[in-house]
Every structure is written in structure tokens, then in C-alpha cells.
Amino acid sequence: MKKGMKRSLTLLAAVTLAFGIAGCAGGNYGGSANTGNEPAAGTATETKGNGEKTKLVYWTYQRHDAEYIKAKIDEFNATNEDNIEVEMTMMAENYPQSLDLAFTSGQAPDVFATQRPDEFYAKGYFEPLNDYMTDEMKANYEGFILEGGNQFENNIISLPNVGNTIRLIYNVDMFEKAGLQPPKSLDEMVAAAKKITEIGKADGIYGWSLPYKSPSSALSRSAAKIAEMNSYHRSGFDFKTAKYDFSGWKPIIEAFRQMSADGSVLPGSEALDMDPMRAQFSEGKIGMYISYSTEPGVYNSQFPAKIRWDATLVPTIDGGEPQGTVDPAAITWLSMSSESKNKEAAWKFMSYMYQDEILRGYHEAGLGISVLPHVLEGAKEPSVPGIKNFLPTKYDAAWPIAPTGITPEGKTWDEEFVKYILVGGDLDQVVSDLNASYNAALDKAVADGKVKVTADPSFDPKALQK
């Protein structure tokens, strides 16, 4: 594993400033949660003797479950017999960049919510968990360890907690006022956004929004999931040919572009992060958007909804039977830092968090949808308002893992598509250029021995449905 290198004092100051800004956005949950006003010092040095505590730093980007996780951390801090104290730091915005900067400046947390597993594995940020896991734990997670997902070169870097189903979330009040039913096709979605805007614009209500400030955040939760439902992998990779092909995405991106051209998109969406957009939906200013099964928790605690809202399956291209599935991505949750000086203590904390009781409570609280059989056994159906239509159907099932670490020259697919959605242009040319750049990057990765791909002409996305 590569070790983080210490940078200049200027960089360290920048890291501290970034932590302060990100932490302030996270809110204060009391106890040992760090919101950035007093930046975490990074990896703690293990303390011995004199009754001193071994202090661990835990980073997360997930706000929706903060109250539950904070309570469990407080319980761990109060009851563990190893004198371990965990401090939680929340940074919902720019989390990957902050994490990357922390590792390169020698201030990495001991345990962190996993992101960018392929990229950060290549940089040596993860401590492999194989030797820490018991045989029972390995048996419980059999079938949920995926090479290229939470395992690289047979090194397990994280374990799943829950998956996230994806749904179209809509303002029931506005749909009823407009005489609309939830859209089943892209054309119906575009028409619904336009009609809601027509009758609501005078009150600042628009039919559609996404957090376009971050193209990856905006489209990975929406266009990519519609693509999966319609038989196209979220990465653009075609398992039948072992090549990238974004051609099937064109009607999806055209629909998003049409809503923008129609003026159906909440003004300022191009500068919105996810939480400010959620706040607008809670106030009744947005007719619909697409997002994860974390939303019920958001609208019951973080941004209590002032409207009636509900969720439904994302539309298919033509409104017909789905030809694929939406992958719940039940792959990762917590990871241990390769830089931690307290790895045994970090694993004790991680083992505590991965207890069936805690994962089952997480599911029952409606904070996420568990896909783990040993957790679901005996679990109650979540009672959180709004969760019912997020529960898994046969259209929620895992896809194979596509090649990872494929970095094209120029802009990524989400950047190019968001540019087209907001500004317009020649979509055929955009798709052609993306196919060329991604396949060139894939060919290079194969030639360099970084990935292996094999075409599977018999692959059928509809067969993923359970």
C-alpha cells in the first residue's frame, strides 16, 4: 500500500480550512460528533497506560442517518471495554476530494465511509479486511463480495450495509392539482414537468430538478438508473460486446434536455447541491426528481416535508415493461484506513457497527434497505412514512461489475451529458465522442493489463429480474 506523503504547511492549512467548511455544512449532532468547528486531527496516535483512551476518527458523508449512527457511536464509546473513543466527522459536500486531500497530507481518518473504491484502492488508501474477518462473518457476506466492487486483487476493502433502491419522487399535491398520474414513460415525464410548471410557476413551483452543480451526483441517481431499467448499464459498458456504447441513452438525455428547454427545471438547478435541492422539494417548489431510498429519512427528520409526497418506479423509455433492473449497489459501507495507527481498535469499532442488531435497526428505521439475508431474518418492515414504495421489487437487482478505473481523455459522460442538457448541442456527436473516448481508454487499460474484459453475446439484462 502506498503511504500518504506530507505536504507543505500551506497544504495543511488548506486541508484544515476545507474540513471547517465541510463540517459546518454537516450540522451538529452533539456528543463526539465533529462538525468542523474544531477540525479533527486525523489519525490518532494510540495511547497506552494511565487510563488514556485510544481515539479513532471516523468520517462520513451521509447526513440522513446521522442521528442513528451518532447514537450507536455514543453507545460504543460508553460500553466498549478497550477504552476506545470514536469521533465522527460529517462532510456531505466534496467528500471524496476532502478524503483524498487528507490522505495525501497525512491526516487520514481511521475509519471512513467508502467512496471511489477503485480509484482509492489504486492509491493505497484501504486496509484489507480479509485477515480481520472471522469465518462466520465471511460466510454471512458470501455472495456480497464482488471483485471490482468491494474487493480488488482479492483484498476486501469494505462490506455492504444496505442497498439503495432508486425511485421517481413526486409532489402528490401538485400532481393532483395538475390532474396527473406518476409518469411511466419519458414522454409522460416531460409532459408532467411542463404542466406542473405551467400551473405552478407563478408560485415559484417547477416540474423538475436535479443537483446539476455536480454532474456525477445528478445523473448517477437519475439518467443512469433509467438506463439500467431499460437494459443499459449505468457506466455505458455493454456486456454483450465488451465495449462502451452510450447510444441507447439518447432518448433519456433528450428527455432531460427537453425539460430544460421547456423551462420546466427549477431555476438555479445548475448551481444546486443535493441538500439545498431537497429543501426546495420539501417546501413544495419541485414537482418531481429521482433519487435514493434515503429520501424518507430526509423528509421525516432533516427537511420535514410540508407537502404530501410519494415515490414510484423510474420510467421506461416507452412506458412498457422494464427490460433491465436498477442496481441497489449493495457493495460498500465502512472502510479502514491503511494509514491508521490503531488498526485493531478500528476493527473493533467496525465489527461493532456491522453487528446484525445495528444493521437490522438501520433497516427497520428506514435509513436504508438491507439486502443481507442474515440481517433481514427477523427484521420488521420499516415503518417510516414514505418508505413503502422504496421496498425492493423484482426490478431492483444487481448487475455484473463493469470495468473500473476507466478514465477517458476529456470530459466524463456525466459532464458531457449535463452540458448538453443545460445548453443543447449535437447529441449524436456527443454520444459518438463519448464512445470513442471511453473505448480508447478501455483499450489502453486492457493493453496495460489493468483490466480484462470478455464479450458475452448471451447477456440478457432482463434475466437479472428476480
Image: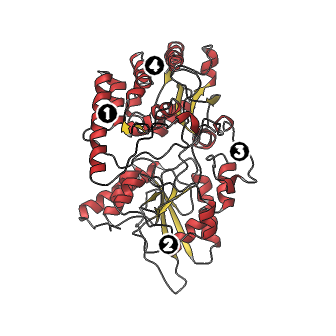
Image quadrant assignment for residue 217:
top left
The circle drawn on residue 55 is: 2
SS class of the residue under badge 1?
helix
Q: Amino acid at mark 3?
A: Pro
The circle drawn on residue 264 is: 4
- Disc 1 crowd rating (10 Å Cα; few below 14, some 14-19, many 20+) is many
Q: Amino acid at mark 1?
A: Asn
Q: Which residue is mark 1?
A: 435
Q: Amino acid at mark 2?
A: Lys
Residue sitting nearer the eye, 27 or 145: 145
Q: Mark 1 to mark 4: distance in Å? A: 30 Å
SS class of the residue under badge 4?
loop
Q: Is residue 213 left or right of residue 226?
A: left
Q: Mark 4 to mark 3: distance in Å? A: 34 Å
Compared with 50, 375 (above or below) is: above
SS class of the residue under badge 3?
loop
Q: Which residue is mark 3?
A: 382
Q: Mark 3 to mark 1: distance in Å? A: 42 Å
Identity of the residue drawn at 50% across and 34% down? 228
Identity of the residue drawn at 41% across and 29% down? 269
Q: Earlier in the sequence, mark 2 or mark 4?
A: 2
The circle drawn on residue 61 is: none
Can you give x and y, in whole percent of width and height, for residue 40 in the image?
Answer: 43, 64
